Image: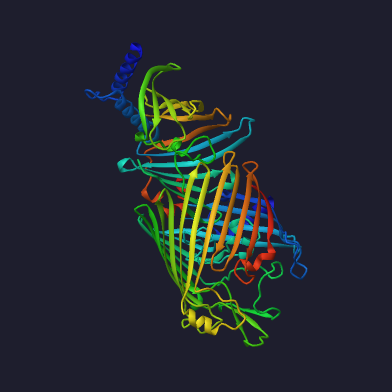
């Protein structure tokens, strides 16, 4: 514990907000200790030392330091963990920011978690980085989020507010690792390199959200200028490629969302136009086409402690004919109108200490699915455990969920919070 | 039978006088029961222009296992009988920093938002007041923030002394969705606070009992500072203590916004 206080002391000296004695009194220290193991249940393995029956295994200690003063707030969330599959200790700075207010506006500078949009694990205007490997291996949902280094400005009135985010350091989505997940590879065996946007001022990503609540509906407009976070694959030659480069083409997204009480539940809707700046004609197969994306959702509580949620999502590709014409033969083609639906069922028992739930994706166009059943029990106010399944499948092994057919897994998590 | 009618009439007169309202000529006991319930709601759920209180709920199983829900309640009355709630959870550890915000409207479904700090996520919650337990306690959302007076038909049953306090016993039968088939309320004649409530299910069996265990004067407003809800059937009960209650503290509109959900106003949380 002394080490922690020493760290805090050094930190506060560095930031130099208030004298150390006052700091120690008002500093809030919280966190958790967590064990999290995830087993593949199909008996199949990817090659390599990390490709065993365990997709994931770790012991994790999170420390949160929160200090509020008159002029601002300091918040740090650091995870210390041991990756049991790779057998190595590591550290992850999940959040580290300073908040301050200037007039009617708030500023947050530093590493932070950002979430926008009204989807239930469907993302259109939520263009922030995600860790799909964490999501697919049953880790607690907060680890789907990859923190970003950003400057965020909040301003507005009680009726209308705006958030403006500048992200100078590009962060790609984290895809399921090929060392641990069996998955589709359009260029099997070909070496890959990654080419992220250069660290230049002009590559700073900008995102803005204007939002307010009118007639009980939370309504928002969004604008994003940056890059696709999922890599596009560029082959040095199409017939017999010897090198694949993962690139992140330029992207602008215009969008809107709304949600509110209607039809005896909560109704939500979101739209977005993904403008692929480098692929506007749709002739380059290495750059995603522009697309219009939408979803509608409905959530209701038919009886006590039971909720049901439904969503319908669609993705309409622009320049589809050009896409089909230039797609190399043998490559799986995406549909012109890709569709996806989700279903969530949650039932709570025993004074809401036991939760049984399932979240399911099904795509009628890709003909694949992803099911996430979960049991979570709060053993006490500090201790909970959960068992989560991740079941993938589909008609083909080249679709988004279908490719993970051999990765069905079961995760066990136990966390003690303090 | 005659005695009972007299009692009812007596109770109505007592109620009308205590409320400082002259009984309407020809008003039926039914209407007077409703106005008594309305006054009780005002005293119990709408006292002051706003309220700040640290609320500590202890959930107790029959076996004696305890769980604590520790939250800061900020409440503000709005025009037209509307209310706003900002509930910031200090504990337990796995929900620390969670905020529940409710816009409560008479005779209309409430708007309800939940902020989850680990995700920095604001969600809209679909839940029916009458049927959902408040954070796993024996209190429903309605028990915490009040039920529409028009959602039941009310009848004065009798005047009755409850531990030396004079009360009027009211029977309420729901005309809209409810988790009970009948409710009896013992409303104190001086403060209009409910001292006791009994909830009966469709079989006519008692299943939930509310008691106001401590009433204190806060800034001239009688306030229930300790209350208990017991589920008679399961033996589970929830004890609630209101600490540091303060009325008319001047809560601003800016507290009840999505922006404040994401960045809770420090000065009001401790």
Comparing B68 with A299, the one in front is: A299
Q: How is the image coloured?
A: rainbow
Is any atom of residue A303 visible in this view? Answer: yes
Comparing B151 with A244, the one in front is: B151
Q: Is residue A220 above or below residue B126?
A: below
Q: Quadrant of residue B259?
A: bottom left
Residue A109 falls left or right of residue B78: right
The spot of residue B174 in percent (x, y) is: 40, 32
Residue lying farthest right?
A: A49
- Residue at the (76%, 71%) spot, across then down: A47
- Residue at the (60%, 53%) spot, across then down: A64
The spot of residue B225 in percent (x, y) is: 46, 30
Is any atom of residue A138 visible in this view? Answer: no
The spot of residue B257 in percent (x, y) is: 41, 52
- Residue at the (36%, 28%) spot, across then down: B154
Q: Is residue B171 above or below residue A14?
A: above
Comparing A83 with A111, the one in front is: A83
Residue lying farthest left?
A: B25
Give the total number of marks visible in the rendering: 0
The spot of residue A358 in percent (x, y) is: 59, 53
Residue A344 falls left or right of residue B19: right
């Amino acid at each position: 514990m002394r080490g922690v206080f020493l760290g805090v002391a050094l930190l506060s000296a560095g930031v130099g907000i208030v004298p150390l004695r006052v700091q120690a009194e008002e500093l809030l220290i919280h966190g958790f200790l967590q064990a999290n193991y995830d087993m593949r249940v199909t008996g199949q393995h990817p090659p390599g030392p990390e490709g065993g029956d365990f997709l994931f295994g770790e012991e994790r200690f999170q420390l949160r330091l929160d200090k509020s003063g008159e002029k601002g707030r300091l918040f740090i969330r650091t995870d210390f963990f041991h990756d049991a599959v790779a057998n190595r200790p590591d550290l992850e700075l999940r959040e580290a920011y300073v908040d301050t207010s200037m007039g009617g506006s708030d500023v947050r500078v530093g590493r932070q978690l950002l979430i926008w949009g009204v989807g239930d694990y469907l993302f259109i205007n939520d263009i922030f980085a995600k860790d799909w490997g964490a999501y697919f291996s049953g880790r607690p949902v907060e680890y789907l989020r990859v923190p970003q280094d950003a400057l965020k400005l909040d301003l507005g009135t009680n009726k209308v507010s705006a958030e403006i985010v500048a992200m100078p350091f590009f962060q790609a989505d984290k895809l399921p690792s090929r060392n641990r997940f069996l998955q589709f590879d359009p260029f099997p065996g070909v070496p890959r390199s990654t080419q992220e946007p250069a660290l230049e001022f002009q590559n700073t990503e900008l995102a803005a959200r204007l939002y307010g609540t009118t007639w009980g509906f939370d309504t928002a407009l969004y604008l994003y200028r940056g890059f696709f976070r999922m890599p596009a694959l560029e082959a040095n030659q199409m017939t017999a490629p010897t090198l694949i480069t993962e690139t992140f083409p330029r992207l602008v997204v215009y969008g809107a969302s709304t949600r509110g009480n209607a039809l005896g539940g909560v109704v939500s809707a979101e739209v977005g136009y993904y403008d692929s700046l480098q692929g506007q004609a749709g002739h380059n197969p290495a750059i995603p086409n522009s697309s219009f994306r939408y979803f509608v959702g409905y959530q209701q509580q038919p009886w006590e402690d039971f909720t049901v949620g439904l969503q319908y999502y669609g993705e309409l590709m622009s320049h589809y004919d050009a896409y089909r014409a230039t797609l190399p033969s043998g490559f799986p083609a995406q549909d012109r109108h890709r569709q996806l639906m989700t279903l969530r069922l949650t039932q709570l028992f025993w004074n809401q200490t036991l939760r049984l739930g399932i979240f399911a994706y099904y795509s009628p166009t890709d003909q694949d699915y992803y099911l996430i059943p979960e049991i979570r029990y709060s053993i006490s106010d500090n201790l909970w455990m959960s068992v989560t399944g991740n079941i993938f499948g589909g008609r083909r092994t080249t679709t988004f969920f279908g490719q993970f057919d051999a990765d069905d897994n079961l995760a066990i998590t136990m966390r003690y919070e303090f | 039978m005659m005695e009972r009618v007299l009692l009812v009439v007596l109770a109505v007169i007592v109620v009308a006088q205590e409320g400082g309202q002259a009984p309407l000529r020809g008003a039926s006991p039914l209407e007077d029961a409703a106005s008594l319930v309305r006054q009780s709601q005002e005293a119990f759920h709408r006292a002051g222009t706003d309220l700040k209180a640290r609320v500590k709920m202890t959930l107790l199983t029959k076996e004696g296992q305890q769980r604590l829900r520790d939250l800061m309640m900020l409440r503000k009355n709005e025009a037209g009988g509307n209310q706003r709630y900002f509930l910031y959870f200090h504990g337990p550890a796995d929900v620390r920093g969670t905020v529940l915000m409710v816009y409560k409207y008479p005779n209309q479904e409430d708007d309800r938002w939940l902020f989850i700090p680990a995700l920095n996520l604001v969600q809209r919650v679909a839940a029916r007041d009458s049927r959902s337990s408040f954070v796993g306690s024996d209190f429903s959302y309605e028990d915490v923030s009040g039920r529409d007076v028009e959602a039941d038909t009310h009848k004065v049953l009798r005047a009755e002394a409850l531990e030396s306090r004079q009360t009027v016993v009211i029977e309420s039968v729901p005309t809209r969705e409810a988790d009970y088939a009948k409710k009896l309320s013992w409303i104190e004649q001086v403060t209009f606070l409910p001292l006791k409530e009994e909830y009966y299910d469709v079989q006519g069996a008692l299943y939930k009992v509310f008691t106001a265990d401590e009433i204190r004067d806060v800034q001239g407003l009688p306030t229930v500072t300790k209350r208990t809800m017991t589920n008679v059937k399961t033996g589970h009960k929830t004890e609630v203590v209101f600490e540091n209650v303060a009325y008319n503290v001047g809560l601003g509109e800016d507290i009840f916004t999505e922006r404040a959900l994401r960045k809770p106003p420090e000065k009001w949380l401790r």
